[in-house]
Image (tube, rainbow, N blue to C red):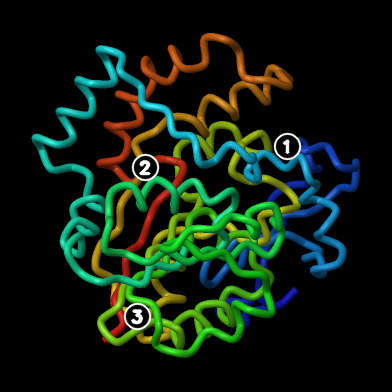
Amino acid sequence: MRCVLCNSENNKFLLKATDTYMNVDDKVYDLVQCRDCQLTTLNPILTEDELKKYYPSDYKIFDKQAEITFNDKSFLSNIRTKLIKILRLNTLELLLEKYSSKKINYLDYGCGNGKNIFTLSNKFSEWSFHGYDKFNNKILDFKDKRIFFYDKKNFELIKDEYFDIINLSSVIEHVNNPKELIFFLYKKLKKNGIIIIKTPNFQSLSRKIFQKNWHNLDIPRHFHIFSAKNLNLLLEMHNLKKIKTIYSRNSGVELKSFYKILNLQKKPKFHKLLLKIFNPITFILSFFNLTSTFTIVSKKD
């Protein structure tokens, strides 16, 4: 098997697993890792037609209730929020706020249910928001003067150098050929525009602990699991200069991985309480680059 990132054929077998998130079928897939760049890849990688059945209409990320946002007003949550704000630890939020008064074209590629767009639209009144998700057609009927959702045909007609900010949150791991995608999005990005990529962290502590039960493997929807090092290599190939790498501070993946070991089909009623208990641990792990997801922010020169 040839590595999609570095073209090496020198790889090693890691594990076998099935779809335990949506339980579409019992087909067994392998995970292999390139010995040269350490990119971890599903084997075999599915075609787009084969993949469609693994994104059924009840796929959880396509929840119709995305427009409704909830605020956690608990004491512990408020303390955590204030601490992050005082210490200026929310690097991504601080970066976006620099553009708050500017006319910005913001693309959420792989926008799922549109939750990120709806949240940001309440905060940045000068921005225009654009969303595309090839597996979710439910959002296409939404109408708003600042929010636009595209099907595949209309999205490909968008002119080059149109977007100031492109966001890919939990997307690149789902893509058959990430090099082709980054090249395509690079063309759509304006000069000095930024691209934000959030993805699972293969180097995380929880991946090493939970192994095939690690929630972020999400077989077979996740084709590639990156580390910060090899994702940055991909971006450098396309002349995108890294600004910042940010590691998540939420323990949701760790808890879901634990539930998977217990064979729990639904989150327990005390899930939110467990998050509040374990998030401080994840907060500490983030300083050692060991949490389950990371975000790289890069700039087009």
Residue 190 in picture, x, y percent from top left: 34, 84
Mark 2 falls on what kind of element? Answer: loop
Residue 74 in picture, x, y percent from top left: 31, 14
The one of 224 and 56 positioned closer to us in this rendering: 56
| Residue at 81 percent of width and 65 percent of height | 46
Estimate how packed mark 1 is, as few (under 14), some (14 to 19) or many (20 or more) residues with alpha carbons within 10 Å. some
Q: CA distance from mark 2 to mark 3?
A: 22 Å
214 relative position to 247: left or right: right
The amino acid type found where label 3 is placed reads Leu
Q: Which quadrant: the C terminus? A: bottom left
Q: Which quadrant: the N terminus? A: bottom right
Estimate how packed mark 2 is, as few (under 14), some (14 to 19) or many (20 or more) residues with alpha carbons within 10 Å. many
Q: Is residue 202 visible?
A: no
**In the image, is residue 152 above or below residue 139?**
below
Q: CA distance from mark 1 to mark 2?
A: 21 Å
| Residue at 16 percent of width and 61 percent of height | 98
Residue named by callout 1: 21
Mark 3 falls on what kind of element? Answer: strand
Estimate how packed mark 3 is, as few (under 14), some (14 to 19) or many (20 or more) residues with alpha carbons within 10 Å. many
Mark 1 falls on what kind of element? Answer: loop
Residue 243 in picture, x, y percent from top left: 24, 68
Residue named by callout 2: 248
Q: CA distance from mark 1 to mark 3?
A: 33 Å
The one of 45 and 204 positioned closer to us in this rendering: 45
Mark positioned earlier in the residue sequence (1 or 3): 1
**In the image, is residue 189 above or below residue 22?**
below
Q: Which mark is residue 240?
A: 3
